Image (tube, rainbow, N blue to C red):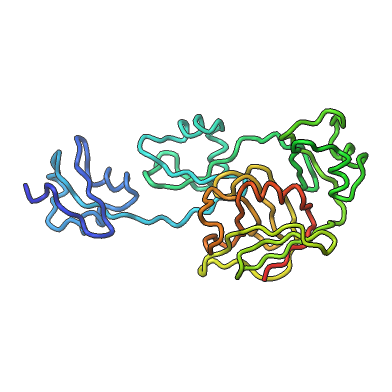
């Protein structure tokens, strides 16, 4: 009996101390593994004779990496979590979580499982062009119209109910479609994103690009949508590219900037991507080389 106390478990397993009411079936279910896998990891174990305080080795199952869609953030299940408690914590509904995680079984959540949490509504206006702008200090509709080559009246038409004389910092408005006056060039080797307006360099920003196993695509693309506060690994802003599933976005890991660290997207510091977001309309050409 004592041979099961203070044992060291092999790589790929973790130690678990049997508690009252435990069975191999319950333990396997809790750790998303199988009874047979536990038996294999514990030669000589007698499933019918588990005892409180016994230490066994439980295989660690590495779930496939969860890539959450834009507008959601990854969350790792912790002990005691339920969908109801998670929904309350993030001010959303259980239905929201189920919609964002097709196939999830609410009764079979397990510690370490990663699910996608939808972001609460951000207050963005309805915008058919998916072309948003976040009001900053000192902004006026006249100045914004000039940035995007549109008229003030077009801005007013795209934002019903807006008062041109009363706009507030942080307010999100919709920008009507118009030819883009800017262009973006991204160097994978230099880890830089350069913004050009009418052929003149405006500014270069440091970025992170894709890992060798998940490289950033090369070629010429366009920005097809924009989103404010997508959250999680996407940081404070998202600009989606015409190459499906790729975009330019902020980050919750600023230490990665300047390295090859992403799953293929182009990451920026949040302050930098906020600035870029307000200068780049949908339709902007993005060249990556």
Q: Position of residue 121 (x, y in %)?
A: 65, 35
Front-most of residues 274 and 217: 274
Q: Is residue 1 visible?
A: no
Front-most of residues 179 and 60: 179
Q: The C terminus appears in which quarter of the rendering?
A: bottom right
- The image shows residue 25, relative to residue 220, as above or below, that is above
Q: Position of residue 205 (x, y in %)?
A: 66, 57
Task: Place residue 143 in its image quadrant.
Answer: top right
Q: Residue at x 56, y 64 (%)?
A: 210
Front-most of residues 176 and 61: 176
- The image shows residue 170, relative to residue 201, as above or below, that is above
All told, the count of numbered labels is 0
Q: Residue at x 12, y 56 (%)?
A: 44
Front-most of residues 80 and 269: 269
Task: Place residue 193 in its image quadrant.
Answer: bottom right
The reply, left or right, for residue 11 in relation to residue 260 is left
Q: Position of residue 170 (x, y in %)?
A: 71, 35
- The image shows residue 155, relative to residue 256, as above or below, that is above
Q: Position of residue 231 (x, y in %)?
A: 58, 44
Q: Residue at x 77, y 50 (%)?
A: 279
């Amino acid at each position: 009996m004592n041979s099961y106390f203070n044992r060291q478990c092999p790589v790929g397993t973790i130690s678990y101390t049997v508690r009252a009411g435990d069975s191999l079936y319950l333990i396997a279910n809790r750790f998303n593994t199988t009874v047979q896998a536990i038996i294999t990891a514990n030669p000589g174990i007698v499933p019918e004779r588990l005892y409180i305080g016994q230490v066994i080795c439980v295989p660690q199952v590495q779930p496939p990496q969860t890539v959450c869609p834009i507008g959601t953030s990854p969350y790792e299940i912790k002990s005691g979590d339920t969908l109801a408690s998670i929904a309350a914590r993030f001010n959303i509904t259980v239905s929201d979580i189920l919609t964002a995680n097709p196939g999830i079984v609410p009764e079979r959540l397990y510690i370490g499982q990663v699910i996608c949490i939808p972001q609460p509504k951000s207050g963005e206006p309805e915008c058919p062009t998916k072309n948003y702008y976040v009001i900053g200090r000192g902004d006026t509709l006249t100045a914004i119209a000039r940035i995007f080559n549109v008229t003030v009246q077009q801005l007013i038409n795209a934002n019903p109910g807006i008062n041109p004389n009363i706009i507030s910092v942080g307010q999100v408005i919709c920008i009507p479609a118009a030819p883009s006056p800017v262009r973006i060039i991204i160097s994978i080797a230099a880890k830089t994103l350069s913004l050009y307006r009418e052929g003149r360099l405006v500014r270069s920003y440091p970025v992170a690009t894709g890992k060798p196993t998940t490289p950033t695509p090369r070629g010429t693309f366009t920005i097809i949508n924009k989103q404010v506060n997508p959250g999680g690994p996407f940081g404070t802003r998202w600009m989606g590219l015409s190459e499906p599933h790729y975009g330019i976005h902020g980050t919750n890991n600023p230490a990665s900037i300047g390295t090859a660290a992403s799953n293929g997207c182009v990451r920026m510091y949040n302050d930098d991507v906020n600035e870029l977001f307000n200068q780049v309309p949908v339709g902007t050409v993005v060249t990556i080389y």
